[in-house]
Image: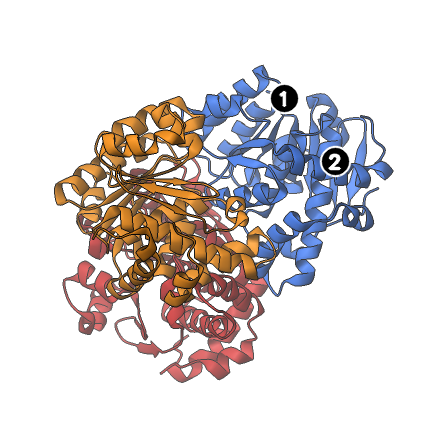
Chain colours: A orange, B red, C blue
Amino acid sequence: MQALPSELPKIAADILNRIRNKRPRVHCITNAVAQTFSANVLLAAGAIPSMTIAPKEIAGFVARADALLVNLGTFDTERQKAAVKAIAVARKNKTPWVLDPVFIDRSKPRATFAKTLVAKRPTVVRLNAAEFSALTGADAKALARYAKSRRTVVGLTGETDFVHDGKRLVTIANGDPMMARVTAMGCAGAAFVGACLAVEPDAWTATAAALTVFGVAGEMAGARSRGPGSFAMEIVDALYNLDPTAIVEKAKVS
Amino acid sequence: MQALPSELPKIAADILNRIRNKRPRVHCITNAVAQTFSANVLLAAGAIPSMTIAPKEIAGFVARADALLVNLGTFDTERQKAAVKAIAVARKNKTPWVLDPVFIDRSKPRATFAKTLVAKRPTVVRLNAAEFSALTGADAKALARYAKSRRTVVGLTGETDFVHDGKRLVTIANGDPMMARVTAMGCAGAAFVGACLAVEPDAWTATAAALTVFGVAGEMAGARSRGPGSFAMEIVDALYNLDPTAIVEKAKVS
Amino acid sequence: MQALPSELPKIAADILNRIRNKRPRVHCITNAVAQTFSANVLLAAGAIPSMTIAPKEIAGFVARADALLVNLGTFDTERQKAAVKAIAVARKNKTPWVLDPVFIDRSKPRATFAKTLVAKRPTVVRLNAAEFSALTGADAKALARYAKSRRTVVGLTGETDFVHDGKRLVTIANGDPMMARVTAMGCAGAAFVGACLAVEPDAWTATAAALTVFGVAGEMAGARSRGPGSFAMEIVDALYNLDPTAIVEKAKVS
């Protein structure tokens, strides 16, 4: 359970194998721009996505899911209500859930809502530095303290990713610059964190594994693509074909 | 009109030609994850998609359409209302319509709604075995009886597809395993059933043709792709380029 | 500011460079089918898209945007309200905005709503001949008179594009037939007009530049693709990689 950073690449490879074998269900409340790409990323990795936000059925879908993603990228009333319902079911069933507070640095009402969700103790919060600052009022140096005080794992993504659970820190330097040129890449990455949480009980390990595997797939896509259009296609193929030994070879984890 | 299974490959090739020449309009009430891909599949085949669900204009769009698709994959209140309105117009105008009761095996309220729509006599119901069971309470052996009692054509899709109208059965063994790894592939296939219904009055023939052509396009995409990302792109190209003689050669219809 | 048609190719190349350097924010109220592709086109060109339509935050997003797109392709109540709010903010801040009245030739309520938006003086209206006729009751010959009377730039797109501001006309003959076979291609083109308006104060020049650059990218995609699936990917790569000198060489502007 308590992996060291040096052991993470091997564990990440194993987590990908577990997803391929167990085919966990990941329910995603995510924004309209990200839905199709996120579903395709999950399917390519081996997970089974579902995406409904309908009030009548959200509880049933979450109850049967192995992990939940709550992404705030489309901040409409229906999705807010769906998020609250879904989180209640996930908490009751001890289903792991990821909060992805997209663009809260650009919208105060969204940041306020995100804070109410953090109070419900997400298993993982995935965000970038600007979003972290909007959520916490502090800069990235406060990562450890924030993770500890909120009893959550924080995955702070950027050129280098940092994953902290209040005690343990791991930094991941995988990825490709083209990932910032395809819409919903971060949202799909957060959905993939959900898939890893579905098969790995230690949330810090699962988050680090997700960001490592997704970053390695991004590097492979970068090597094959000529621009962001082909990159979006290639990263889906790369995730599908990813050889676990390549994860161990290419992981830049410390 | 009353084609034999052995004649279907040639008729399927002809139906694709008719779509390319007549460019029928297919109005799709479909889920958010499937909209873009379904529109691109229809355009590649030669049909003209429209996708609005707005209450004020749905009747006008359906009135001008040559076929209608009702897909339940996003079960929100707005789409349910749009579906009821759209079906009323289609029935009045004798416009053929396809019901695709996605994931009703995962959601009771959705299954209940699907049953009320089947009572309105869809031209075709397309579903997989789990959805068929949720709709009928029976297993796939009840296919003939269900199609007959509901006076509809049922397209039961899976590794092998079965199309029954209560009297005639055809089985289609085309397709590629990668089709299960791309989101909305079945939804887009159901939209393509709509395009075939728009140019072929015999619904059993149109459904069999649609599943054959889509399956052959899938096989061609499978031969060119390296994973689900490239597969999603290649099947659109394959549909666009599909040589009618290849349909006759590759069809596995009996 | 008052460019001649012969100078436009060079200016178009410069405008693309400005987008790449300044990375303007373009807020898009656009239809569900077009959101992902439009976001990817903007990112490939160098702009930063945002897409929210939530009532609580639309004003804040538009206030921080450098241009606004209002596309009527999904005519739901929420998007109509968002459009009215967004336009009020854009007008107050003198932020340029594009109106794309998609499919108003197919829906009377949509055409009526489009007329109320034209009365708010969009910087640019982009539409095809059928939509122009639904908006104005006249045929394309009335282009100059309509642009002048409404004090707007009209980008009339088709096999050949015409851009008129009431005084100046430019015709652009770039593009590829495959652009009509990919859903949301025109919507994404209108979003790209927004990106050009964000960096070029003369709206006639910005619109002509956008249609030229997008058409040249389409020609390059056409040369590399085998069908509409690969075309959709290739035009994103082409925009990303587009060499400004190629714009000057390939522009068909008069």
Q: Nearer the viewer, residue C1 or C47?
A: C47
Q: What chain letter is assigned to the residue under label 1?
A: C
Q: Nearer the viewer, residue A11 or C26?
A: A11
Q: CA distance from mark 1 to mark 2?
A: 16 Å
Q: Is residue C68 visible?
A: yes
Q: What chain letter is assigned to the residue under label 2?
A: C
Q: Is residue C25 above or below residue B45?
A: above
Q: Which residue is mark 1?
A: C121
What kind of element bears circle 2?
Answer: strand
Q: Using residue C19 as the reference point, say whether residue C14 is left or right of it.
A: right
Question: Where on the picture, by quarter, is residue B97?
Answer: bottom left
Residue B105 locus on image (x, y percent): 21, 57
Q: Residues within 10 Å of mark 2 (few under 14, many from 20)?
A: many
Residue B170 locus on image (x, y percent): 33, 78
Q: Are marks 1 and 2 on the same chain?
A: yes
Q: Residues within 10 Å of mark 1 (few under 14, many from 20)?
A: some
Contact, mark 1 vs mark 2 (Cβ under 8 Å): no
Question: Where on the picture, by quarter, is residue B148?
Answer: bottom left
**What amino acid type should be assigned to the residue bearing mark 2?**
Val
Q: Is residue B41 visible?
A: no
Task: Tell me which residue sits at (17%, 37%) in the image.
Answer: A88
Which dot marks residue C163?
A: 2
Q: Using residue A1 as the reference point, say whether residue B197 is left or right of it.
A: right
**What amino acid type should be assigned to the residue bearing mark 1?**
Arg
Q: Is residue B65 above or below residue C39?
A: below
Q: Using residue C164 as the reference point, say whether residue B43 is left or right of it.
A: left
What kind of element bears circle 1?
Answer: loop
In primary-sequence order, the first of circles 1 and 2 is 1
Residue B160 locus on image (x, y percent): 32, 75
Q: Is residue C176 above or below residue C5?
A: below
Residue projecting furthest to the top: C92
